[in-house]
Image (cartoon, helix red, strand yellow):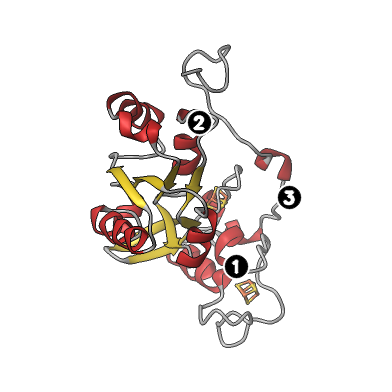
Amino acid sequence: MIITKKKDIKDILAALEGKETVYLFGCDSCAEQCNTGGQKELDEMAAILTENGKKVVGSSLPAETCYRQLALKDYRNKPEIKEAEAVLVLACGAGVRTVADVADETQPVYPALDSLFLATVERVGRFFEGCSLCGECVLIDTGGICPHTECPKGLLNGPCGGMADGMCEVDTGNECAWVRIYARLKKQNRLDSMKKIAAPKDHSVGTKPKKVLLRNPAGPALKKK
Ligand code: SF4
Ligand code: SF4
């Protein structure tokens, strides 16, 4: 799940300066669970914009705003979207990007949220970063705990010299990732994995922007509207 937080409303109002009519997009998936882009947040944003002299001409809450076909469906079925002077998206950056691709290129599309990280969801409202999408997973040797993500220094071959009493020297309040990796591998009788020297990270596999084309790989990166 993608974790988001609300932008400062002052920054949003500054971006909307000079625009009178605004259409809102939320996202009924990740942003809804983060309390940043569900129906409640759409209603709150509409009220704030109205108080600040804007006319909110409508809103959409797609099941997943990063899914182009869903945003496109709303653009085709709701003429008021195209008539708005600006679109404000309460979703992660992928959702904003998707709406911006679907919108007419003359229509500005703004983010209302900041996108933070890909989360493991412990339970509703408790989100933890467990993977930073490096493109070359090492969990096979680390007992399912990611040193790239959970060690603030991203060390791949055991702990740094600063670990004290099992705790990370960086002020995270967390146990050292490598202490946890060791403990888990020990329980699994896999401590031999600790002896493997991990090669330097191949950052070329993380080159951006990434894409995966399971269908029509020879086609354009993004289908025209
Ligand atoms: S090594 Fe860590 S950051 Fe890379 S893919 Fe695996 S879990 Fe994600
Ligand atoms: S103490 Fe452990 S988790 Fe913290 S920076 Fe050093 S190796 Fe990484």
Residue 101: image tag? 2
**What amino acid does circle 1 point to?**
Cys
Q: Residue at x 46, y 19 (%)?
A: 225
For ligand 2, which image quadrant applies? bottom right
| Residue name at image x 39 percent, y 51 percent | 90
The residue positioned 52% from the left and 22% from the top of the image is 213
Q: Looking at this rendering, what residue extends furthest in the right direction?
A: 200
**Disc 3 marks which amino acid?**
Ala
Quarter where residue 209 is shown: top right
The reply to whether residue 116 is in sight is no
Label 2, label 1: how far apart the Cα atoms are = 36 Å
Mark 3 or 2: in front is 2
Q: Identify the secondary structure beneath mark 2.
A: helix
Of tags 1 and 3, the one toward the viewer is 1
Q: Secondary structure at mark 3?
A: loop
| Mark 1 vs ligand 2: CB below 8 Å | yes
**For discs 2 and 1, the disc positioned in front in the rendered view:** 2
**Residue type indicated by callout 2:** Asp
Q: Residues within 10 Å of mark 1 (few under 14, many from 20)?
A: many
Most foreground residue, 38 or 169 = 38
Please state if 199 lies on the left or on the right of 210 as rendered.
Answer: right
- Which residue is painted at 24% across and 58% down in the image? 40
Q: What percent of the width, then of the height, locates residue 177?
A: 55, 70
Gap between marks 3 and 2 measured at Cα: 39 Å
Residue located beneath label 3 in the image: 199
Q: Which residue is mark 1?
A: 151
Label annotation for residue 198: none
Are the two marked residues, 1 and 3, in contact with CB atoms closer than 8 angstroms? no
